[in-house]
Amino acid sequence: MGKEFTIRQATKADFAAIDEINRSSGCWDGELTSHELLEKRHGKIDALDWAQQMTKAVAEHIRKPGVVCFAAEVDGKIAGYAAGEKKKTRQTELGQISYNAVLPEYRGRGIGRELVKHVMRNLSNSGARVLYVVTIDKDQPAAAMYEKLGFEKLTSHRYYTMDSKDIP
Ligand SMILES: CC(C)(COP(=O)(O)OP(=O)(O)OC[C@H]1O[C@@H](n2cnc3c(N)ncnc32)[C@H](O)[C@@H]1OP(=O)(O)O)[C@@H](O)C(=O)NCCC(=O)NCCS
């Protein structure tokens, strides 16, 4: 299969399409996030459900100054995005891959990997010496993608929750 997608830096004009990717059914379905696990265990804990919270968080993030965002286009349609940011000060040599997603119908063609690679190169070119990304163990496609890109697992966090009515 030829390379039927192009990657470019996203502009303000693309943000609505990226919001739409995050909002679309199936974007986060089947991918486990800590928000989702929290909601499965404790029920809805916010006016917005976990998928809406993800959509809102990404929408705010990509509009933040200093955040770099790339978009993948297939036949004029935005099929996926990846964002990242160099942490804090100008001296910081740490760059984070923050959010990325590809529409379900465009997955498995190398788009996610190419998008994240663009963010990695951009962060490196702006002075990040160390790159990191956080995902949860159960999110296999994302974990496999990061490992294919050369990331090595540093550690796992344990995320405990309980109902406050059960405080001993
Ligand atoms: C993670 C995601 C962006 C991958 O996008 P994609 O375009 O399908 O990924 P690619 O085709 O570039 O695949 C790159 C590598 O990822 C891994 N991968 C992708 N999909 C996979 C799957 N379903 N199962 C296991 N590994 C998978 C493979 O190692 C693959 O390399 P290979 O094709 O050489 O085997 C996509 O699954 C997605 O949008 N998921 C929902 C959002 C999400 O979880 N984002 C990450 C948040 S941390």
Image: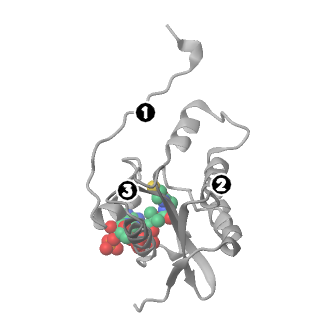
Q: How many residues crowd mark 2 within 10 Å: few (<14), some (14–19), many (20+)?
A: few
Residue at the disc numbered 1: 159
Disc 1 marks which amino acid? Tyr
SS type, badge 1: loop
State the CA–CA distance, disc 1 to disc 2: 24 Å
Residue at the disc numbered 2: 60
Q: Does the residue labelled 3 lie within 8 Å of ligand 1?
A: yes
Looking at marks 3 and 1 on the same chain, the residue that comes earlier in the sequence is marked by 3
Residue at the disc numbered 3: 140
Q: Is mark 2 within 8 Å of ligand 1?
A: no
Disc 3 marks which amino acid? Gln
Q: Where is residue 45 drawn, in percent x and y? A: 66, 33
Q: Where is residue 71 drawn, in percent x and y? A: 55, 74
State the CA–CA distance, disc 2 to disc 3: 26 Å
Residue depicted at 60% across the width and 89% down the height: 75
Instruction: Indicate how the structure is coloured in the image.
Output: one colour
Q: Which of these two is toward me, 136 or 18?
A: 18
